[in-house]
Image (cartoon, helix red, strand yellow):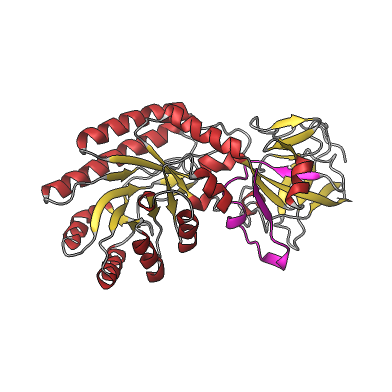
Amino acid sequence: MMHNKKPEHSAPSQFAVVDNCLVVGGMPLTRLVQRAGGTPLYACDRALLNQRVQLLRAHCPAALRIHYSVKANPLPAVVQHLANQVDGFDVASGGELQIALATAIDPTQISFTGPGKTDAELLQAVAAGVIIHAESLNELHRIDQIARTYGYAPDVMLRLNPDFELKSSGLKMAGGSRQFGLDAELVPDVLQALDQMVLRLVGVHIYAGSQNLNSVAINETLSKSCALAISVAQLTAARGGQPLLRVNLGGGFGIPYFPGESALDIAAVGRHLHDCVALLEQAITGVVVEIELGRYLVGEAGVYITRVIDKKFSRGGCFVITDGGMNHHLAASGNLGQVIRKNFPVAVGNRMQANSDQLASVVGPLCTPLDLLADQMPVGHAQVGDLIVVFQSGAYGASASPGNFLSHAPVREVLV
């Protein structure tokens, strides 16, 4: 069946095309796949990682410390590379902590956040000298007990759950009743409890939401976060406690995935961050201001590549069947059945300049109709053996997908 429809997407501008073939990491896609040992494959372009960090540095104040949130892409090669580009890491498990500690980053620039840290993970963090972002009063007591048992005096930051949220976010992480952080109104009680502990309070962490493309909403939340941090600093000073040394303003910077979405106005956010850092430095002597970013740093630098193993027509519909799918790229499939599913940008990577009026659905090898990488996209010119590319795939890919579902071979991952 032939359809007259303009493509929903074109290849993102950060990638070049040479001789009809997508180029990633300076290599034509076909050569990259060969060198990586085949498909399915995630490939992350180190030059694009560098460019994204440089973009941030160009717009943000020099005093602002940029931390990478390892959960976005914990591939050790990516984390090792970013260790030379960013100022610190944010980790959310003992496994991520091990990856971060294997880099050249100073452990004092590694923060361990997230609810549900086990005693073993807390001991690992205390012994390594990383900063623990405490999510509850009970967690603070557990850290204190570990510190007393093993003779440590660890540094901690309070992750706060403010009474505001980051509007227009894909995921809201603050405001209302949350599993994340200490409710801001409990800070006085928490400070009183800390008086009886061997822990050293060095700062606060406020993370209100993620995947946000609205610079106005981000800037509004940054302002509110600064005000909250200053109020806590004033409270600790009034009690005669240790001055706050660090303020982590979170992040939430998003990237465009779907038709109609525009890139975040990083210049507008950067201008506001200059004001935020100046305000915090004036209000809190000697403070270091941090942001933590994951998806924004790595998401647009990565692609998912899967090979066409079959092509079929069923009652007027065209299906391009690939050797990888939802098991490797849950987000592109719609995260187990979103009410309104949207397509990531996709292309036939070795036929980039071929025009196709035939729409096709790209499906993986799994025995479920949820295994859908692209729904009715202009890739009907794909042939068996071709390479389907899913863009915007550098974040929350393999590690955020059900890789063991149906026991297919694991996906390859490379930094190029």
Q: Is residue 162 in view?
A: no
Which quadrant of the figure contains the N terminus?
A: top right
Q: Front-most of 170 and 88?
A: 88
Tell me, yes or no, if residue 254 can be seen here. yes
| Residue 395 among those drawn in magenta | yes
Tell me if residue 350 comes above or below residue 362 in the rendering.
Answer: above
Foreground of the two, 101 or 409:
101
Q: Residue at x 51, y 39 (%)?
A: 254
Residue at point 63%, 57% (across, down): 336
Residue 76 locus on image (x, y percent): 56, 53
Residue 39 locus on image (x, y percent): 75, 52
Foreground: 102 or 388?
Answer: 102
Residue range of the region highlighted in magenta in the rendering? 387-416
Relative to 125, 35 lies left or right: right
Q: Position of residue 296 (x, y in %)?
A: 51, 40
Spot occupied by residue 59 in the image (x, y as percentages of width and height): 43, 27
Q: Quadrant of residue 252?
A: top left
Q: Is residue 334 left or right of residue 141?
A: right
Q: Residue at x 19, y 59 (%)?
A: 189
**Residue visible at 50% across and 53% down in the picture:** 71
Quarter of image, res 32: top right
Badge count: 0
**The image quarter in which residue 371 lies:** bottom right
Q: Is residue 362 a member of the stretch shown in magenta?
A: no
